[in-house]
Image (spheres, grey):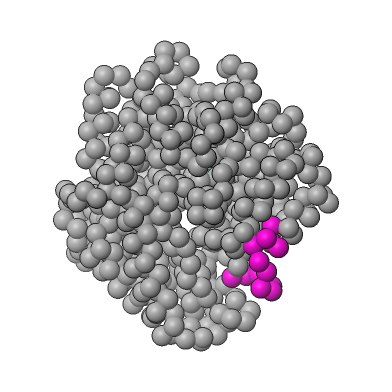
Amino acid sequence: MTEIQYRLEQKRRVLGDFPGPKSAALAERRKKVVAGGVASGVPVYVADADGGIIQDVDGNSFIDLGSGIAVTSVGASDAAVVGAVAEQAAHFTHTCFMVTPYEGYIELAEELARLTPGDHEKRSVLFNSGAEAVENAVKIARLATGRDAVVAFDHAYHGRTNLTMALTAKAMPYKTGFGPFAPEIYRVPMSYPYREEADIKGEEAAQRAITMIEKQIGGDQVAAILIEPVQGEGGFIVPAEGFLPTLAAWAKEKGIVFIADEVQSGFCRTGAWFASQHEGVVPDLITLAKGIAGGLPLSAVTGRAELLDSVHPGGLGGTYGGNPIACAAALAAIRSMEEYDLNARAQRIEDIVLTRLRKLAEELGEQSIIGEVRGRGAMLAIELVKPGTAHTTKEPNAEATKAIAAACLQAGVVILTCGTYGNVVRLLPPLVIGEELLSDGLDVLETAIRQA
Ligand SMILES: *Cc1c(COP(=O)(O)O)cnc(C)c1O
């Protein structure tokens, strides 16, 4: 494991009330020209970022527990990524792989074949965003099977384009007013251990979903089952053990393409290259983005050769898909993940954070607002409930969640929230964050929880 070198001092520093004057001035300019529908969670503007630190234009240093939503796992300015980007940009920034192809695209597809689960023959196609990867995985599954229906789950998040809005579960803010939505999407119950009515096993939860599919669609009509192995925006929900393998086995039996959306959970985030691997699940197709390229926009669909090769030449592509600079960044980011052993670091983050937060939950007792502490690797969450309901009605506490995020920010820690009920604090630190900095961030979070 190589020692990580940081360019910026890895220390939290809040200079006073913020947003400071420079951020405030940018906010004024923004109001006049940037679409109101784009919201930013944090009211400061970034000047620099490295390791576990984000510096704003007024000189404040924040601890980053969000990684730009699980993107900058190798840090926001990893030296290898920066060097690869500069080197590639000096030669050519774009030619379009569909016009005049280049080696970086092929080399990245080789890496994706090597790293993704399963030792079958694989193919990859590259795009720009997670939503675009999901759209294309569905296109491929429909064409390959000759079927229309796509099954998605409660609490799912798959993006903001028309098809992926239809696949996403939550109305506000993602879907409300933006319809009509794409047809032939069916939603079935997820395994959400904390909120199950009874103590139901993973296999039983899978059977509940399968029965609904059989009854409402018919297994032989389904092109694809699309699922996040650990749900992201829906609340960092880890399904009960046995849920994913049971679904995958049933899909195989029915000729249904099993698509794992690992856009958020992929690339070492959960302490494995891909979250599917925790239960030995081998998806037919896997969608990848976020952590793949050290912050550059890149996404991929990787999967069984016979599925991807069933598409006619010209059926897949896009002007920028697999841009050469993004490919160079991804290749460098993957090398950094291996060099820094980011899977081990994600597991270590899990140990530190879960131990600490579970101890806090125990100390605060049954009357506290902590409903559940959960997650895998560096994809960790606290689900917050109204006081005293943690083991009874589990009433979501979105107000406390907001208050905790705001208090953390005031103290110089960037944390994100999520969840169908807006009541989950999620921790997604860069995997290169130092342990001292992480501990300092957790001190701040703990204080905020105690106050809430
Ligand atoms: C973020 C996300 C997407 C959408 O990715 P974009 O790059 O924002 O389009 C899709 N699926 C999952 C699981 C995600 O977390």
> Magenta part of the protein: which range?
194-206
Residue toward you, 137 or 251: 251
Identify the residue at image location x=32%, y=56%.
345
The answer to whether residue 197 is magenta is: yes
User: Which picture quadrant has residue 416?
Assistant: bottom left
In percent of width and height, residue 54 lies at: 26, 53
Q: Please report the residue visible at 27 percent of the width from the left and 44 percent of the height from the top.
A: 339
Q: Residue at x 40, y 70 (%)?
A: 354
Q: Is residue 296 above or below residue 348?
A: above
**Residue 54 visible within the image:** no
Horizontal side of 438 relative to 229 (left or right) equals: left
Q: How many marks?
A: 0
**Image location (x, y in percent) of residue 92:** 30, 19
Image quadrant holding the C terminus, namely: bottom left
- Residue 316: image quadrant is top right
189 to the left or right of 349: right
Image check: 210 left or right of 370? Answer: right
Q: Position of residue 123 (x, y in %)?
A: 52, 28
